[in-house]
Amino acid sequence: MAEVAGLLLRRRPSAGALIVGVTGGVASGKTTFSAGLEASLKSATPLHVERVSTDGFLLANAVLAARDLSMRKGFPESYDATGLARALADVRTGAVDFPGYSHITYDVDPALTRRIEAPDILIVEGVALPMAAGGERGQIDVVIYLDADEASMEAWYVDRFLRFWAAARDDPASFYAQFGRLALDEADRLARSVWRAINLPLLRECVLPARKRADIVVHKRADHRINRISARRAWPSLDRRTAVTL
């Protein structure tokens, strides 16, 4: 992590923000990785570093339902892509309100909106990154892709689903409370069906193409530990196999 942070600092422009995109499949660990990268950057420099998620630019559940897009949540058409692109452009020079998203309520939450003002480095994480980048790069300066095999990502998603499902027993406001009467094996089957119907097609159709365009690819094992980092030739200090532990 420290090596990636150091490389990003050397790539930072002399003026303006460096916008770093972190993408990968659903439950690939984007938030955890981004938080670790943010902490590493903050420990290495006094620069203003911020972190946001593209999830806040998902259309509200009510809007998705009205447009018959509930089963396409996460796909390009389920985002306010124009709003995301505008926010990334405007944050380079001024203050921007980034909307927030709750994984508990499974919806955009206005209370989680954050004002970000002209950061030196902005980390943007989410599956929507390839769709928001306006072609090859758009508003993203550096693309980091979290790579893992499909079986691992399915297991990570099911584990996350079951954690939210278990926690919802004490939180009637949770989106997962509606599944409270399910037995554990039934909840497990439901999570796997969601993975196969939505998240796996999303990965194959919309997320994987970003791997070819990524500047840095972080390869993860089934236990979430990073076992290799690879990079484009333009990034020679990382253009080799490197053993890393997250």
Image (cartoon, grey):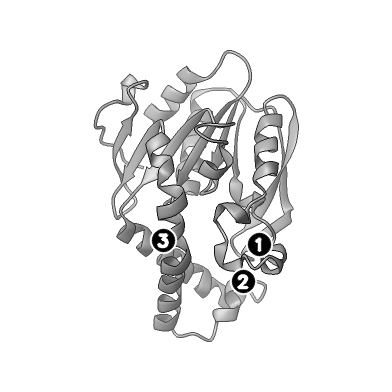
Rendered location of residue 79, percent (x, y): 63, 52
Dot 3: element: helix
The quarter holding residue 157 reads: bottom left
Q: Residues within 10 Å of mark 1 (few under 14, many from 20)?
A: some
Query: Mark 1 to mark 3: distance in Å?
Result: 20 Å
Reading the image, the residue beneath label 2 is 175
| Residue displayed at 54% across by 71% down | 167
Q: Compare marks 1 and 3 and give the one earlier in the sequence.
A: 1
- Give the side of residue 131 with respect to residue 191, left or right: right
Reading the image, the residue beneath label 3 is 200
Q: Residues within 10 Å of mark 3 (few under 14, many from 20)?
A: some
Q: Are marks 2 and 3 in contact (CB under 8 Å)?
A: no
Q: Are marks 1 and 2 in contact (CB under 8 Å)?
A: yes
Rendered location of residue 169, percent (x, y): 57, 78
- Give the side of residue 212 with respect to residue 118, left or right: left
Q: Residues within 10 Å of mark 2 (few under 14, many from 20)?
A: some
| Residue displayed at 75% across by 32% down | 95
Residue type marked 1: Asp
Dot 1: element: strand
Rendered location of residue 9, percent (x, y): 48, 21
Residue type marked 2: Phe
Q: The C terminus lies in which quarter of the figure?
A: top left
Reading the image, the residue beneath label 1 is 107
